[in-house]
Structure formats: structure tokens, C-alpha cells
Image: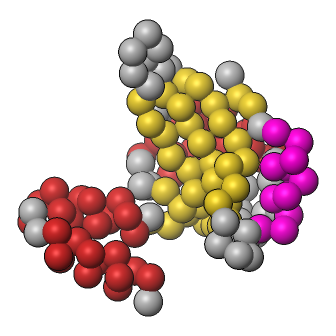
Amino acid sequence: MFWTFDLCVRAFPHCKPFVQVDGTWLYGKYTQILLLAIAQDGNNNMLPIAFAIVDKKNMGSWEFFLTNLRRYVISNDSICIISDRGKGLTATIRRSGVPWRSVYCIRHIASNFHRDYKNADWKRQVVKMGKE
């Protein structure tokens, strides 16, 4: 299932040309995955622009999500997708033929760094480097 809201669609052209996409597991009675796309306006406010409920994070679910995101929300080809660059997502972007660029999310990089080195101060420094 994919959905968006008309106000978000109308607000998106006024946002920065970056869209962060990610997914999170739902818990409890529902065990699917919630995929989301979020943009940021000129005042650094976050704007959720699209949502989907899927069974798995794979190429098929990312294709479903990105196809609908393009169809209903993003008409601009000059968009940068920020993500954890999972294999299914990056392959789907390449295969789609849409000239969207895909880059790593600094928070994902920092989390992976922290997982390996277990140093919270170093993790903060990684995030700080990514913002400068």
C-alpha cells in the first residue's frame, strides 16, 4: 500500500532537492515494513512526503515505492536520494532509468562506524565531519 497527502505533494516543490528514504519494521500485530520518503524545506523543517507498507525490503518493494513516489510526488529529475544505500534500493534506482542520484546517509555511516568501534565520541565526530 502506498499513500501520500495532497498538502505534502504541493509543498514538495518548495523543498530542497534531496529526499531521504528509509524503511523501518513494524512491531506487534503488524510485522510488515513501513517505507518513507522525507524532504526538507528551506527552514530545515522535515516534510514527510510518501509512505508505503511492504512485506520485505527488496528490489520489488523499492520499485513499487519509487515508482509511486515519482508518479505522485516527485516530477523533478534533479533529485538526490539519501539512504543507507541498501543493495535493493540502489539497484532499483539504477534500473529505473530515472536520473536520480543516490548518496549515503551520514547517520547510517556513523551507526555502522559505532557498531564496529563502540566509541560514542568518535561517532559524534563522524556525524560532525559529514555536516561540515
Q: State the image quarter where residue 26 is shown.
A: top left
Quadrant where the image shows the C terminus: bottom left
In the foreground, 46 or 3? 46
Residue 97: where, in percent of width, then height? 70, 53
Residue 14: where, in percent of width, then height? 84, 68
Residue at x 35%, y 82% (from the top left corner) = 128
Relative side of 83 to 7, left or right: left
Residue at x 79%, y 63% (from the top left corner) = 77
Q: Is residue 91 visible?
A: no
* Image: 47 above or below 5: below
The secondary structure that most of the magenta stretch takes on is: helix
* Image: 27 above or below 47: above
| Stretch of the chain drawn in magenta | 5-15
Relative side of 119 to 100, left or right: left
Residue 40: where, in percent of width, then height? 67, 65
Which colour assignment does the render follow? secondary structure
Residue 56: where, in percent of width, then height? 46, 25
Q: State the image quarter where residue 17 is shown.
A: bottom right
